[in-house]
Amino acid sequence: MTQKTLDKPSAYLSEATLHAILRAMLLSRRFDERAWLLHRQGKIVFHASAMGHEAAQVGAVFAIHRGVDYVCPYYRDLAMMIALGWGARALMLDVYAKPGGISSAGRQMPNHFSDRRLGVVSTSAPVAVQVVHAAGMAFAIKYKARLGLPTPDDAPRLALTTLGEGSTSQGDFHEALNWAGVHTLPLICLVENNGYAISVKLQAQMAIRDVSERAAGYGIHGAVVDGMDALAVYDTVYEAAQRAYNGDGATLIDAKVYRFTPHSSDDDDRSYRSREEVEAARANDPILRLRQTLIDLGALTAADFEEMDAEVRSEVDAAQAEVEAMPDPAPEDALADVFAPGRVDAWQS
Amino acid sequence: MNDVLMPQLGESVVEGTISRWLKRVGDPVRAFEPLLEVSTDKVDTEIPAPTDGVLLEILVEAGQTVAKGTRLAVIGAAGESSAPKHESAVSDATAPHITPVVARMAAEYQIDLAQIVGTGRGGRVTKKDVEAYLAQKQSAPPLSAAPWDIPGSGDLFSAKESAPMPTPPAAPNMTAPPPAAAPRLHPVEPIPPQTAGELIPHSPIRRQIAEHMVMSALTSPHVTTVFEVDMSAVMAHREAHKAEFATQGVNLTLTAYFVLAAVAGLRAAPMLNARWTDEGVFVHRVYHIGIAVAVPDGLIVPVIKNAGDLSLLGAARAVNDLAARAREKQLKPDEVRDGTFTITNHGVAGSLFATPLIHQPQVGILGVGVIEKRVKVVTDSLGGDTLAIRPCCYLSLSFDHRVADGAAGDGFLLTVKRALESWT
Amino acid sequence: MAVMTLIEGLRQGMDEALAADPRVFIIGEDVGARGGVFRATQGLFDKYGGDRVIDSPLAESSIVGVGIGAALAGLLPICEIQFADFIYPAFNQIVNEAARMYYRSAGDWHVPLVIRVPYGGGVGGGLYHSQSVESLFAHQPGLKVVVPSTPADAKGLIKAALYDPNPVIIFEPKKGYRGIKGEVPEGEIVTSIGAARVARMGGDVSVFAYGMMAYYAEQAAEMVAVEGIDAEIIDLRTLAPVDRESILASVRKTGKALIVYEDNLTLGYGAEVAALIADDGFEFLDAPVRRLAAPDVPATPFSHPMQDFFMINPDKIAAAIRELAAY
Ligand SMILES: Cc1ncc(C[n+]2csc(CCOP(=O)(O)OP(=O)(O)O)c2C)c(N)n1
Ligand SMILES: [Mg+2]
């Protein structure tokens, strides 16, 4: 029986919020499973999973002003998008590359998320570039505050960015966190450390155990968290967010997760890791762990979970049926949106 | 056997025109003996024979312009054959090729390119050659016979020999594309092969004029308005001051009066001292008055810079100076450009009034007709009308209707008329 | 109207923008108290303070990447890359990120970013302080690339770039920073991006150039003018998007095209100009399209004789104009 310890921020979450966290993770999982099937059916051409990463992604988003603060995610952040407000339909539009797709209306591969309404900056494929953008957005937040530029109450107060541990080897990761340190930026950099960069193991990527050890080198805070524990992630990111909101600078978080699937629908992981290793990791499924935690807390029953599961499955079914029937983009849509028209709005003081 | 080649007469000179041959085919020649005369942009000179022998063949006839290095003639032993033969008198060893634009124009206007004497490298027919050819065929009477073009001697100066080429005035601002940048000359009927007559090849100045005139006609909607001016006051003034000016070495030409009167007119109607651009009308702050001058081959337009700053003495001196140097072929390129308005004296040959073509990219051109005595009804101070004999002339103003309207044109001429009629 | 140098025009443009709009700020190496190694930002640090004229860490990718983030967040950054030769670490941020952001988000996110880049040779800078890299960027849809060759355009283009909602790179001909002088209007002037400038009208040969080469081409045109050759000089001014119409209009007029650029010949920007003339101006050509550019060696050598041999100058341009005029 897990004790509800009141020194942790997660202890203050309502039952409805805890359900929402679980539901987001579950919907992500059910969509993810469906996407693999659709890929094997030849109905979609690409998918990359969040399976095993759901707790880290959802726990983090619930700890910031979600839908308000800036988010610069990476391709594995399906569950994060759901936590931010997406449903199965939005994800389905992306995997089917339909015109209504919020991320890119069919221009980018699936998993390259964007949603301006939610503060989510368009994701690209070269890894780690987004960390620099997040630093720039954090810089802008600080700049506006220092110059006293009018910002509405619901303006973003921090930038959250994510990447895999392999991607931390990139220079951009270093350059961005260096900026964050020099300028004391309101930034959270969440490393979803699954131990693999496609096939390359952590040990081949860095000579340290925890990515967050690097934080000291940038003069920012570092933290390690069990990324399979949604509420632990929530707590760690919550603390980082308060640091950012209070002007105390950036945090680098190493969230230990495990990738249950191959790298993407184009990968076969049997060549570089054993089935036993994967099976052992699956025993630590973040969804089952949160389910148990909530049951232990008396915040959920097994029947609640079954009901929740049935509900998300039917959401996935409905989304697939609807989106599959939608027309594809007009070929010449390929030509639109090269340049933004017009002129930047004049400054009104 | 030796070829006589067109030499490069100066660093930047790439072609020359055969003025005349001093020997005929079959004549014996000695090395260094003058063989022909060549004229280029820079020098006119005799070309000596490269070797002893007999002039076997002349490959480029007098009057033609060819590139440096072109074979002009062949000298060899008597009776020797000058083969290989050339298909074209002006060509290099290889037949000159046809560029895309020339091919297109030839097709569009159904031109037999063999009819055109090429002035490009190796005798290539250039786009300008085609345009000049079309311009020449198109106009009957040819452009060269336009009234204001006729050389003559009158009050306006006339150069006795051809002056250096003016830099052709630039076309209007081009940030936006012009209608069809190259002046589209209208198609002309090819001359039927047996037609009796003579083809006079174009001189460079003729081509430039042709091109410019067509461009001007196509660029600006021209409107011409005519006023009559009583020149009594000017004539009286001139008589009274001629000698005084002469003591300062200045010939008090009537042109000077017209220049200053035109400046007064332009001050009253600034839109005529302007140029059209797609963004707007650019009104000049300076008054640079061009004077169209007849030269044997066409005309040239030296420019009196800052005429608005000049006294009558200054204007007369400037006119004298430009006239003298035009005659001596001493005009600098800078002196034939940047005009903001032009005056042409078509009256020198007796013309009463004309519809001059604008010197692009200017907006107006003032034509001065012949000054002759006419019977006029004049009203005395008591209101009584009498007949009087007065020296009069017509002033014709052509202007670009895109830029200015009738009010501006008439305002200009009215001011010019008043200035001249009240000269003191 | 004040007469000033090209770099003063740039500076005035930045100064006025900083004064008028608090969203505008400058980041780059040594742009602060030092005023930039070329002094483009001289005095701005004193006037606007370190919050707005910011010395960045020595890391080009982040200079641009942070600029992108700030632009996404509603600011109007001016990022200075100290020399074009050092832009490569930022290439990915410029090309993969800034240039593609609007397209890849189907118009949701735009990046109003200005990147200032001193470029070009003839300054004794050797291999790594002389490069012309503009064609690498003009090749990227989504990026605007401009090159001023007059002080007025330097000011007008930086203003236009700042208020353009897209990323704009200004390649600044550093050799002309102080050598090129001209009148610059007071106050707000905006040079429209996408429009070439007819630097000199003429009817015989069209010369297409930009930056220092446009300046030289005007000098070359005056050299050949006294010989009776009337060259038209088109200062392309915007390399992307290219002003096709102005290029073609000039070719239609003269039938002869010379393209001058100081980059290496092969696949330099002039290759594209030549190709578009071949595509859409073929029927108007009265001579082959000619390119005058640097030899295909890896950038400007340091020794002066070698540098002079490598560089295009007014004499070389004049010779090429004569050659084409005579064709
Ligand atoms: C700059 C760059 N190089 C290579 C790739 C190809 N690539 C895509 S994902 C990936 C592995 C990333 O591993 P990691 O950062 O650990 O993230 P994970 O996929 O494990 O979540 C690689 C090599 C890329 N996208 N970008
Ligand atoms: Mg990984």
Image: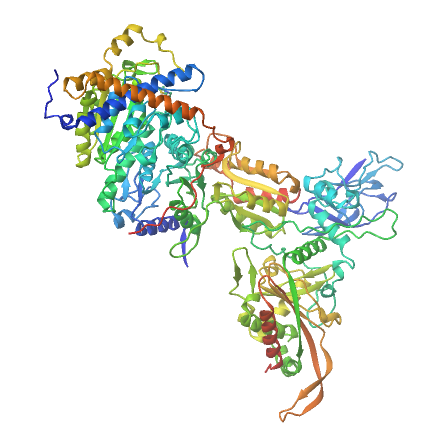
Q: How many marks?
A: 0
* B210 left or right of A253 in image: right
Of the pair C83 and B346, the residue shown nearer to us: B346
Task: Give me the residue at 19% from left, 16% from top.
Answer: A292
Quadrant of the rendering where the N terminus of chain A is positioned? top left
* Nearer-the-camera pick, A238 or B97: A238
The picture quadrant where one finds residue B245 is bottom right
Residue closest to the eye, A56 or B290:
A56
How is the protein colored in the picture? rainbow
Q: From the viewer's perspective, is residue A332 above or below residue C244?
A: above
Ligand 2, seen in the image, is in the quarter at top left
Position of A260 relative to A153 (above/below) = above
Name the image quarter holding residue B268: bottom right
- From the top left corner, tell me how far across and down residue A140 is, in percent: 27, 39
Left-right relation of B248 to B150: left
**Res C127 quadrant in image:** top left
Q: Is residue A228 visible?
A: no
Residue C17 drawn at (x, y percent): 34, 50
Q: Can you see residue A253?
A: yes
Residue C290, position in %: x, y? 59, 38
Is C274 positioned to the left or the right of A144 in the image?
A: right
Residue at the outermost bottom position: B382
Indicate the position of residue A217 as horizontal and vertical percent values: 21, 26
